[in-house]
Image (cartoon, coloured by chain):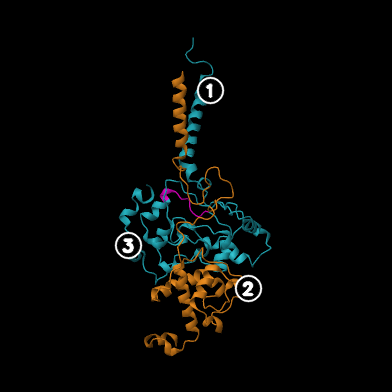
Chain colours: A orange, B cyan
Amino acid sequence: MRWRSGAAVAVLSVALTACDNMANQPKLNPYELPVGSQVNWPIKPVPHTVARDDPPAAPSPPPVTMALLERGQERFDIYCSPCHSRVGDGNGIIVQRGFPHPPSYHSESLRNAPNQLFYDVITHGYGAMYSYADRVEPADRWAIVAYIRALQASASASLSDVPADKRSTLQ
Amino acid sequence: MAVFGPRANLFMTAALVGVFCVCVFLVAAIWVVPLVDYNSQQQFTPEQPIPFSHKHHVSGLGLDCRYCHTTVEESSNAGMPSTAICMTCHSQIWTNAAMLEPDRKSLAENTPIRWTRVYTLPDYVYFDHSIHIAKGVGCTECHGPIGDMAMTWKANNLYMSWCLSCHRDPAPHLRPKDQVFNPHWRRTDSTPSGDALLVQYHIKTEALSDCGICHR
């Protein structure tokens, strides 16, 4: 009699686990709650510990290349342009909807500001601006700084700054 | 003594009707039910803690997908925005809106907002957003007209046959890399052909429908 009930349990457990065709496996997916955890997940890091994928220190500015500027333009348009606008005058769409007006990059003080200031503001935020450290990687921050410098240069550029073979496209 | 009783015909009819009903039930259970939208939840719009509108944020304000889904280019998971990302704007705009109360509560209590999943894959499928982005598959190829959705609804059924329809013939679903995140992109005469993009992106179609591409 005992082996019969044992067999029944074995058959039932196989049948029941086969029900979801392994759609739910004993592994955790992103955003899945660990077994037994409550709504205050994710668990905060233990105090006085450092996440092992945290960058140890900020990288130094890379040499400015065309690839860096293009990366900077792409990242700027994603993360900065909603407020600072694509030309950097601070009239982005979110500002038009009521967000406090950020200073224009073309102001005298920001034209003379050191590169490190822009990097630090992206990292830590400033005034109404939140920190973008969780969205913009350190290397991308330097790319954005390089692109902001290009935007600033473009505001006071004249036709003679444009390569001779490209001038006709502007006229 | 008669072989068949007086109610034999009735039993026989009942049995035939019963067999017919069982057949209809099996056909429905095996072929019809898995294919209806109710089962796959296609077009289904789940309720969310905050009635977030992609239509307003993407088509109205012109925010890039990556502003909120920050890991979509590097990770298998596109990444759901943290409370801080919502609050980047909503600490200043719509600060008293009742619909944003869960967001403010989340910030004050340091607990994450738990959104309701729209697309769920079984654990035996190893889907990766980043490789699809890197190979020029636009968001709307799978997520439908996401830029025009007031509330997010499931645009595809996620059946394996649907995955394979693209994996067997990816060319029509490819676009130039700078248009991957454009929710309103349309192929024009000047767009490089799908076959040209296949070559440009080094997509090897003969391996794309191997089992091990999605299952391990």
Contact between marks 2 and 1 (CB within 8 A): the answer is no
Q: CA distance from mark 3 to mark 2?
A: 46 Å
- Which residue does the numbered mark 1 point to in the structure image? B10
Letter of the chain that mark 2 sits on in the rendering? A
State the residue at coordinates (42%, 85%): A169
Q: Label 3 is placed on what type of residue?
A: His
- Which residue does the numbered mark 3 point to in the structure image? B202
State the residue at coordinates (50%, 47%): B40
Letter of the chain that mark 3 sits on in the rendering? B
Q: Secondary structure at mark 1?
A: helix
Q: Is residue B147 at least partly visible in the picture? A: yes
Q: CA distance from mark 2 to mark 1?
A: 83 Å
Magenta segment range? B154-161
Q: Position of residue B145 (x, y in %)?
A: 51, 61
Q: Position of residue A154 (x, y in %)?
A: 48, 83
Along the viewing direction, whichever of B85 and A119 lies nearer the viewer: A119
- Which residue does the numbered mark 2 point to in the structure image? A100
Q: Is residue B110 left or right of residue B123?
A: right
User: Mark 2 or mark 1: which is in front?
Assistant: 2
The image quarter containing residue B178 is: bottom left
- Dominant secondary structure of the residues highlighted in magenta in the image: loop
* In the image, farthest residue toward the top: B1
Along the viewing direction, whichever of A43 and B209 lies nearer the viewer: A43
